[in-house]
Amino acid sequence: MRGRPRSRHNVVRPIEKINRDSVAQQVFSDLMSRILAGEFEPGVRLPAEHALSESYGVSRASVRAALQKLATLGLVESRVGEGTFVRDSSLESLSREVSPLVARDSMTPHVTEFRELIERASTSLAVERASDAELDRFVELADSLLARAGEHDLGTYLDDDYEFHLALCKLSHNPLYEWMYGSIRDLFKLRIRSNLDKTAEAYPDALKASAQTHQLFAQALRRRDEAGALALIHSIVNLPPSLVEPGADR
């Protein structure tokens, strides 16, 4: 008796050999998801390579490759003679790992466009979502920035200036905005420092002018004056502070 003829559409796919790299990738993906989910908390030592090898049913070489990939992302760190430990995997921590990679001269022309999008969106969301107490603290940050400007220490001013804008992103209550802004920490400072270096001699009060405008912005946000705050943040992002004299509207 002849069997039923096979349909020409019922094509059997060829069986392919399992790539060793894909095994390491599966181990990496599983460990990463467990770390990010909090199953392995920061500071905890991961099981030894041989234990992970037995648990996953893979070679120690595959486990080692997965751990190296996790270390590259800053999720774990290896300590000689102690083992592999989980690092802080918060969004802020991960963005700090990315920031130095982004801080290249070729990226500086794109900073203004990026900041315009993120900071305007954060401003609108902050008007809607931030509490009065959060906005009060934001005004205090602006006051502190003005005090810092009076010290004429460019390095510490840049640190505080960046933290001010990162705080704005946090007011949006959108963690992705905070993470994205965290990734340009070093690039932000590189760009602003460059602007100030070019014009500091002609405008000795550049830091004060910048800080005063930040203060006006924080006050507008505290009043939940969205239109006024958006106009000010546009001005802050698009004009180097060193191009505006003290007391001028930036």
Image (spheres, rainbow, N blue to C red):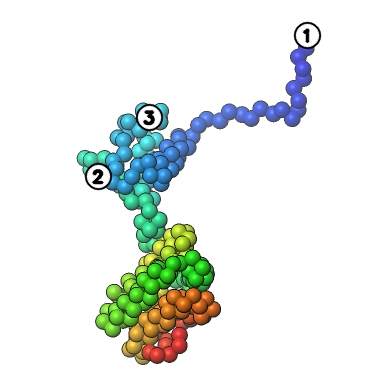
Location of residue 213 in the rendering, given as x and y in whole percent from the top left corner: 41, 82
Secondary-structure class at tag 3: helix
- The amino acid type, in three-letter code, at marker 1 is Met
The mark nearer the N terminus, 3 or 2, is 3
> Residue at left 36%, top 28%?
54
Q: Nearer the viewer, mark 2 or mark 1?
A: 2
Which numbered circle lies on residue 55? Answer: 3
Q: Which residue is mark 2?
A: 79
In the rendered view of the protein, which quadrant contains the N terminus? top right
> Circle 3: is it few (<14), some (14-19), or many (20+) Cα within 10 Å?
few
- The amino acid type, in three-letter code, at marker 2 is Arg
- Residue at mark 3 to residue at mark 2: CA–CA distance: 22 Å
Q: Nearer the viewer, residue 246 or 99?
A: 246
> Residue at left 40%, top 68%?
134
Q: Which residue is mark 1?
A: 1
- Residue at mark 3 to residue at mark 1: CA–CA distance: 50 Å
Location of residue 211 in the rendering, given as x and y in whole percent from the top left corner: 37, 81
The mark nearer the N terminus, 3 or 1, is 1
Would you place residue 246 above or below residue 106 in this image? Answer: below
